[in-house]
Amino acid sequence: MQLLEDEKEQILACVDEVLSNNSKNRENLIPILQKVQAKLGYLPALAMEKIAEDTKVPAADVYGLATFYNQFRLNPPGKHQVKVCLGTACYMVGGDITLESFERRMEIKEGETSTDRLYSLERVACVGCCTMAPVVVLDDQVEGKVTPTRVDGIMLALNEENGKDNKEQKPEQEESGH
Ligand code: FES
């Protein structure tokens, strides 16, 4: 993910601030990562590199820790956050297909943020509305019965609201022709 200069400065300043209030040792890595994420909304690679440097813990270990625990988000949250439920009830009625439909429409994979930072996509466990399966949480709003057709409708509305072109999704065999 490309960072702007002032974002880089903000990230480095945030890490400095957190490290100045916490002891810089390996045992303290998780609380340090949590505090940086709480301030920035995610854990950028640049923050992890700086934490590694200042705590003298190898960068690979810091990355390893951040990717091991799914409480850590490595990409910035999009303007619109889509969370697809893959709990049992939702999975049984095609939650995975709903997720794939969003991936295709957003042109990103689950866990990623679009390059324009408009959308981020993640999977979540049961959100407690199983009777509405398959369920999607769109910017904290629960949407039920989200079939691929509804995914298309949701994405059309979001793209329109954000002034983004709605590319026609053609079946694959048609795309390669001519
Ligand atoms: S399994 Fe998706 S809401 Fe319960």
Image: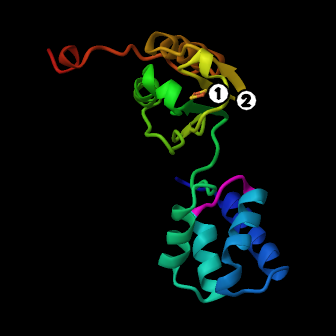
Dots 1, 2 in contact, CB < 8 A:
yes
Which of the 4 image quadrants contains residue 93? top left
Residue at horizontal 36 percent and vertical 16 percent from the top: 169
Hey, what amino acid is under mark 1?
Val
Q: Is residue 43 magenta?
A: yes
Residue 35, image x, y percentages = 77, 65
Label 1 to label 2, Cα distance in Å?
6 Å
Residue position marked by numbered label 1 in the rendering: 137
Identify the main secondary structure in magenta. Answer: loop
Q: Is residue 138 left or right of residue 18?
A: left
Residue position marked by numbered label 2 in the rendering: 140
Mark seen at residue 38: none
Q: Secondary structure at mark 1?
A: strand
Task: Quarter of the image for the C terminus: give it.
Answer: top left
**Residue 54 visible:** no
Residue 52, image x, y percentages = 59, 80
Hey, what amino acid is under mark 2?
Asp
Residue at horizontal 70 percent and vertical 29 percent from the top: 139
Image position of 30 with respect to 124: above or below: below
Which residue is more in the foreground, 177 or 78?
78
Image position of 123 with respect to 57: above or below: above
Q: Quadrant of ligand 1?
A: top right
Which residue is more in the foreground, 167 or 90?
90
The span picked out in magenta is 40-44
**Residue 73 visible:** yes
Image position of 69 with respect to 101: above or below: below
Residue 112, image x, y percentages = 50, 44
Dot 2 beta carbon under 8 Å from ligand 1: no
